[in-house]
Image: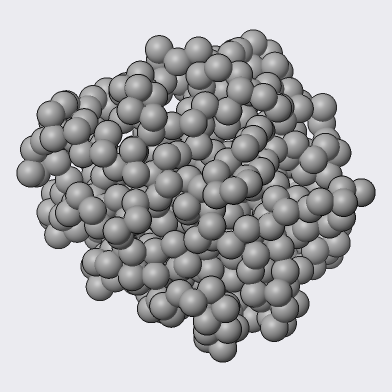
Amino acid sequence: MADITPHGYEKLAGSERKPLAHARPLGPVDPHEKIEVSVYLRAPASEELRAVLARPAQSPERHLTRQEYSENYGASSEDVAKVEQFAREHDLTIVEKNVAARKVVLAGTAAAMSRAFATRLQKYEHPDGTFRGRSGPLHVPRMLDQVVVGVFGLDDRPQASTDVKRYRPMGQANAIAYTPPQLARYYDFPANANGTGQCIAIIELGGGFTSSDLQTYFQQLNVPFPQVTSLAVDGGHNLPIGEPQSADGEVYLDIEVAGAIAPGARIAVYFAPNTDRGFLDAITQAIHDSANAPSVLSISWGSAEASWTAQAMQVMDQAFQTAAALGITICCAAGDTGSADGLSDGQAHVDFPASSPYALACGGTRLVAANGSITSERAWNDSPTSSTGGGISDYFPVPAWQAQTNIPPSVNDGHKGRGMPDVAGNADPQTGYMVHADGQDLVLGGTSAVAPLWAALIALINQQQGKSVGYLNPILYQHYDQLVQANALRDITSGDNGAYAAGVGWDACTGVGTPDGANLLKALQSILSSNSISTL
């Protein structure tokens, strides 16, 4: 059916939704069904925030406080007033106004929402369950054109999947598993730090944990039990399913890897529904959480860029840009299904949100160690079952700080785009992480484990230097030669993920390599005390 824009309305740019494959329409949504949506408003002029990000590294005002950000870069009162007027005119109520996150939450019936945003909502049946969905674009009145940049919650289809892999024997007689502290020693993480004074935020879109399981795990490792707090977002809660093959496995992996390496850090786990709204709201809540004040976020959920709307990628990328201005590092898993990223269209794809230029995309390796040191490490590829994600973004252009990097053209059409991952760490489930979930000891892997591994390392580095390193990507690329000379990075030169191969220097499987944490700390202290880091 051709899209018809109602009189007085404009299409909301980037809001087009495609029908979900294998979904069967069941009929219209009950018009009386209650719906909440998160309406995100425009950011300030991009050059203003870019100027903040380009402040000299040695400047004591390099990062904004959350209060400064809210006062200077939050939603304008005029924009909020326009949304309030829109709500009154369309029988919608205001549930929440978050100036810092530039978000207004509206509630109303399905009928009112459909009229307000000129769309049609239907129920769908899918192998993963039923959901409320739509296709085509949303529309907003002309007074909100250029004011509203995204509307989320009308369509509640599952948006992301976990990047976690359970160990499955593959005929290898000598399968290997490590505890997180063992891997921290192999990667030479700073020995005299435990993350005290830091908060690691973890985003979860399902599953849960029990304190008794965590206590068992940390007691087994003889590691102090970290402070773990769960926070609810959009009705999401810490609800363990009781089966480690479920999302519980992801939750336990994230908490146990981060907590075992940085037990002195507080761990805040944000639980949200697995929808684009839930995912985005969890991230913005964590970024603007002044009570817990995380200095690093670990995100192990994602999906191929092709499965996202442009508005969702734009708004989440803007949230990550906010994190950079606040000095928060965003660590994202790069994906576990190789260069195809789980799609079967014969094309290469990268995983979002890891593909955002403001995310530290974490790829995967296979690590073998003996006698207390690493003996071999290569790009993780257990083809055809699983391998590290990585490749060239179809959505994000090459960032300025990656311009001098030898990024290959996309194998799809030869275009140049944001290359990922940025860094890597052990991910192969055949050399996986020992965890305890739902009463079971098991071995898990995937780039899911690499995101909390790097998040924990960042927490240790932040503790040691007494301030947040924040947006790490420009430093890694602009000072790559210096980091290599300082032995802060271990170049991974063998292996592939399908379409792309590892090699000398940056590559689309393992990025700039895996860390030597102690040397990385020393190098960053030198760089941040004497150089200007430009993100422009």
For residue 344, which quarter of the picture? top right
Q: Observer-nearest residue: 186 or 392?
A: 186
Question: From this viewpoint, is residue 153 visible?
Answer: no
Q: Is residue 124 above or below residue 491?
A: below
**Between 243 and 137, which is closer to the camera in this rendering?**
243
Q: Quadrant of the N terminus?
A: top right
Give coordinates of residue 70: x percent, y percent: 18, 56
Question: Residue at left 33%, top 28%?
Answer: 486
141 relative position to 470: left or right: right
In this picture, is 105 found above or below 189? below
Residue 516 visible in the picture: yes
Residue shown at 41% from the left, 20% from the top: 402
| Residue at image point 30% right, 60% down | 193
Residue 411, quarter of picture: top right
Direction right: furthest residue: 171
Instruction: Point out residue 74 in the picture as x, y percentages from the top left corner.
Output: 22, 53
- For the C terminus, the image quarter is top left
Question: Which of 481/140 is in front?
Answer: 481
Looking at the image, which is closer to me, 447 or 488?
488
